Image (tube, coloured by chain):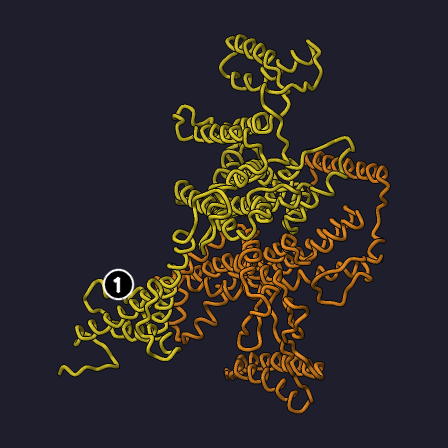
Amino acid sequence: MNRINFLKPDKSNLNTFLYLGSFLFFISILDVFLNSFFKINFVGFLPNFLSFIMPLILGFIGLYFIRIEYSGIKKLDLLNKNINTNNFNAILSLLIIFTVIKSIPPILDWFFIEASFAGDSKDVCSGSGACWTYIKVWMRRFMYGMYPNAEQWRINLSFIALALLGSVGYFATDRFKKYLTLYYVVIYPFIAFLFIFFFISGGPVFFDFSYGIIAAIVSIIIGFFIPNKFKFYYFLIVPLFLYILLKYFLFFEETIELGKLDGLNWVETGAWGGLSLTFIISFFCLIFCFPIGMAFALGRRSDFPLIRYISIGFIEFWRGVPLITVLFMSAVMFPMFLPADFFIDKLVRCIIAISLFEAAYVAEVIRGGLQALPRGQYEAAKSLGMGYWKMHIFVILPQALKLVIPGIANTFLALVKDTPLIFVVGLLEIVGMLNLAKTNPEWLGFAMEGYVFAAIIFWIICYAMSKYSYNLEIKYKTDR
Amino acid sequence: MNFKLKDLGPQLITVIAVVLIFGFFTYNAQINMENRGIDFGYGFLSQESSFDVQFSLIEYDGSHSYFRAYLVGLLNTILVSVIGIIIATIIGVIVGVARLSPNYLINKFAAYYVEFFRNIPLLLQIFFWYFAALRALPLPQDAEAIFGVFFLTIKGLYVPAFIWENLNIFFYSIVAATIAIIVIRFQAKKLQETQGKQIPVFLISIGLLFILPLLSFLIGGVSLSFEIPQLKQLAATSFVYDGGLSLPPELIALTLSLSLYTATFIAECVRAGIQGVGKGQKEAAASIGLTPNQVLKLVIMPQALRIIIPPTTNQYLNLTKNSSLAAAIAYPDLVLVFAGTALMQTGKAIEIVSITMFTYLSLSISISILMNWYNKKIAIQEK
């Protein structure tokens, strides 16, 4: 009765097979484990090849023995269902388990155990592990590029301020919620630009604070007499208008006054670099490419043939060429198209080029969303007497954009991943700085550490972005 | 004719704006070129290029024309793209299917692969393979042979070269086999439609594809021999491999990173395609008595391919465009040879950049026209 049928494990002699199989499986894993962590090979007496595949054979037999359907033991069933459904799967599972066990010690060694962290010269890096000292020494260059060390607090301060200003949305009460879109689309980018231009770059001050304060006070005083209905538009237009009137027409100042914020040195964009430049470029390109893309998506679905063809031409052109040639164009061809005395900074040219390039992709994504909306939505909006713009702003676009959140997130991810390409025009963000540091004669031979470091940073950024977009997708999901 | 006057306004404004912008650019370009004494024209293409290219599929040296240099770059781009597409498809399909596996470990392994490789910039991956990983390979004199004939060294991969005799006969035999297979398929379809008979077309095709070239070896006088790379000493410490084909490390790094990166996207396309076929389709097909193979071949695959192919073609196109990153590691592709070296030498910025862009543009537009045609052909016929 208790005769063991080796070829077909079943429920009747469950225990025998379970113990035998688990034991073999355990032995096989123990063998690989000892082999890789402690360099002990207890099947070493066997011939070379046989000792190499011994764990695989043992593990396979073990898994075969414990493959008993509906054994009634919960954990065993779970194991069988997940990694042990048939012979092929069992072998693949074993291979994966062994690979993982085998690769843990070398990776741990390289990253931590043999790696050197201390010191600040190349001499400490003699071990076989990674040389994180290299990263430590070059950290400022990787983060800020050639930006002068003494001035780097400007970048830090700007980024912290912008991050705080950007998080306003989380704290806004319901009363201010309706202004958030306006804030994020118009005001926030403008503030960001001011920060970058005046603070990070130390650019010339076009804005005269004395006139600005006068204009603000006067417009606020007059503002009390304006009916509530127009107050919003009033404050949008009048202060700026008043300022221009005061400065250029009433008091006849020179158009450009090359004053600077006191104590801030001018740092030209060629010196910017590192991770901060990655952030600056991604940020502005994200902001610019979205409205441009939206405009061209609408243009491509327009009823006017000429506008439609122009939009199609624009989109297909940018989608058809690689970004690197676009950057080439912005570097060598674009200056030829401008008046001789007209100079555009290369960072700005870069941002324009990348924005236009990504805008074409954004346009196609948004067009997908527009097409996916049922016709009824358009017809319903029209039947309520809405015009083209009202229909799109209040009915169509909110729904279409909600549909294409994953697509837009992918485009934005592609944008962030494309920023290293700006090496073409001579701007060095983090990958460019790595390549520069790698050729430094004092620090030759640490390319691997640098690339791993940058890869981890980019991976974290991109993974966080994709997870965030996923959350956004869930949050705005409405069932139809 | 539904011509409306009020429609004309916005269109006219847009057109005028576009024309003005282009006019402004052309006007400035003319003035700038006059000032710098550059004349516009494509005549330089026939001039002698006088620069050398490291790796070229066709015969080329400095005495050839700029047009020849352009062709060298274009062919190198196509070479990288084709190899990359093949490898990326293989990895992508395997990973995409693995992501649907019921095996937890395989599933997770594939998922981690996708998450890992697609969240790291391609340029960084290329740099990693070229400057970090491939630099760790042995020198030519220390390299150990793989299967006795391949040598993977820091200077590239050396593989045996094929030496053909009467290659054209072999080629004809393959063409003949292809034609025969097409005819047989056509006949088999006709036979099935008229008489309901099924013949094993697949087996016959495979057989033909083997037998005809084999016959060309036996009867046609075709012969194939291999030239195995040999280690040769140039100086006391300098070794190279002589003979065989050598694939430069730039090419290896580029194809490796391009295919590993693009495979993640293809894997996602494949997964979406297979998941996109409803479960009911499979059950319905099984319930009318189709065998599992037939279910896969006649029901699942046609529907899954309809979802898979368009985005996958897009990824192929992306791979081709991304191959321009070769310029970063000095693989002589179109961008490096033409928009880099040739531009430096001639200074013809507008002409060269426009030719380069036009090449990529015509490549991608022709593929997208093909795709549109294909999409229309396979779209579900709705009544």
What colour denotes chain A?
Answer: yellow
- Please say if A369 is above or below B189: above
The answer to whether residue B179 shows anywhere in this view is no
Chain identifier, colour orange: B
Residue tagged by mark 1? A78
Q: Give the residue at x 81% y 58%.
A: B50
Q: Is residue A372 above or below residue A102?
A: above
Where is residue A192 drawn, in percent x and y?
54, 29
Label 1: few (<14), some (14–19) or many (≥20) C-alpha neighbours in 10 Å: few
Q: Position of residue B381 (x, y in %)?
A: 54, 62
- Coordinates of residue A425 in the picture (x, y in percent): 66, 43
Quadrant including the C terminus of chain A: top left
Report the front residue among A323 and A36: A36
The type of residue carrying mark 1 is: Leu
Q: Nearer the viewer, residue A375 or B238?
A: B238
Tell me the quarter of the image containing the N terminus of chain A.
Answer: bottom left
* Residue ID at (41%, 54%): A114
Quarter-of-image position of residue B6: top right
Label 1 marks which chain's residue? A
At mark 1, the secondary structure is helix
Q: List x then y, in percent, for residue A253.
A: 70, 13
